[in-house]
Amino acid sequence: MNRMQLARLLDHTLVAANATQADITALCDEAVAHGIGCVAVNSVWAPYCARSLSGKGVTVCACVGFPLGAATARVKTEEAREAVRYGAAEIEMVISIGALRSGFPDFVEKEIAMVVKGVPGVPVKAILETGFLTDAEKDQACRIAVKAGAAFVSTATGYGRSGATVDDVRIMRRVVGNRIGVKAAGGIRSYAEALHFLQAGATRIGSSAGVAILDEAPER
């Protein structure tokens, strides 16, 4: 996969609590300069990114319920709606990990569905935080996300116990089939790693090291 092809599959990410406007500006500028498809930011930065990237071919993804997934479904939904009103074209929500692990799959399904319905026509990525889940819970979470109307399942926030693993991506792809996308995120910092995840079934790569990854990719 060459540099341009990979760039369109990248979510160039900056979700640090201490990110400044200058940092976010640099993120947007890098995305434009390298042909990256999407920037992923905390929802508070969605309006600024949308204005900065207007007409430049880069999508803005707002992260909601981030990074713990511990807000109520109503709060996540309103956060998503506000981000979309101010220019976000994708939403990435952290599911209620505790609810899933407590044996309340219906709760998780309803919260994902509520966010999906709250932003009609906008792709919603459900972050599973796989480092906290058993393989059976990963399987269950993927089935829930598909049923609830998510456009993607995503591995991790980067703030959990662990980031993306190739085995997790394989499980996720096996469960969701070709029905929705799979995003590998959390700790991916090289072209070789990104390629492994894509070969395992990922269709999107999330990383704060997007430029470094692309610098390692072949130009043609």
Image (tube, rainbow, N blue to C red):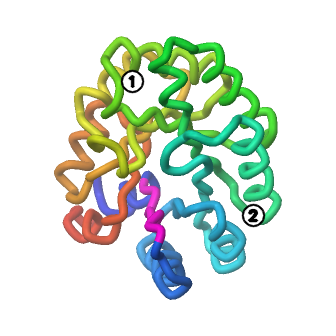
* In the displayed structure image, the side of residue 149 where residue 170 appears, left or right: left
Is the residue marked by circle 1 packed among few (<14), some (14-19), or many (20+) residues within 10 Å? many
Q: How many marks?
A: 2
Ranked by sequence position, the earlier of labels 1 and 2 is 2
Which residue is drawn at the image coordinates 55% and 31% (left, top)?
Answer: 96
Residue closest to the eye, 53 or 129:
129
Q: Which numbered tag is attached to residue 87?
A: 2
* In the displayed structure image, the side of residue 108 where residue 81 appears, left or right: right
Which residue is drawn at the image coordinates 35% and 24% (left, top)?
Answer: 133
Residue closest to the eye, 173 or 97:
97
- Residue 120 drawn above or below residue 90: above
For the residues marked 1 and 2, what is the alpha-carbon distance in whole angstroms? 29 Å
Residue 125 in the image, given as x and y percentages of width and height: 57, 39
Q: Secondary structure at mark 2?
A: loop
Image marks 1 and 2: residues in contact by CB distance under 8 Å: no
Q: Secondary structure at mark 1?
A: helix
Q: Which residues are magenta?
A: 10-17
Quadrant housing the C terminus: bottom left
* In the displayed structure image, the side of residue 103 where residue 77 appears, left or right: right
Which residue is drawn at the image coordinates 46% and 75% (left, top)?
Answer: 18
Q: Is residue 14 magenta?
A: yes
Identity, as a three-letter code, of the amino acid under mark 2? Gly
- Residue 38 drawn above or below residue 199: below
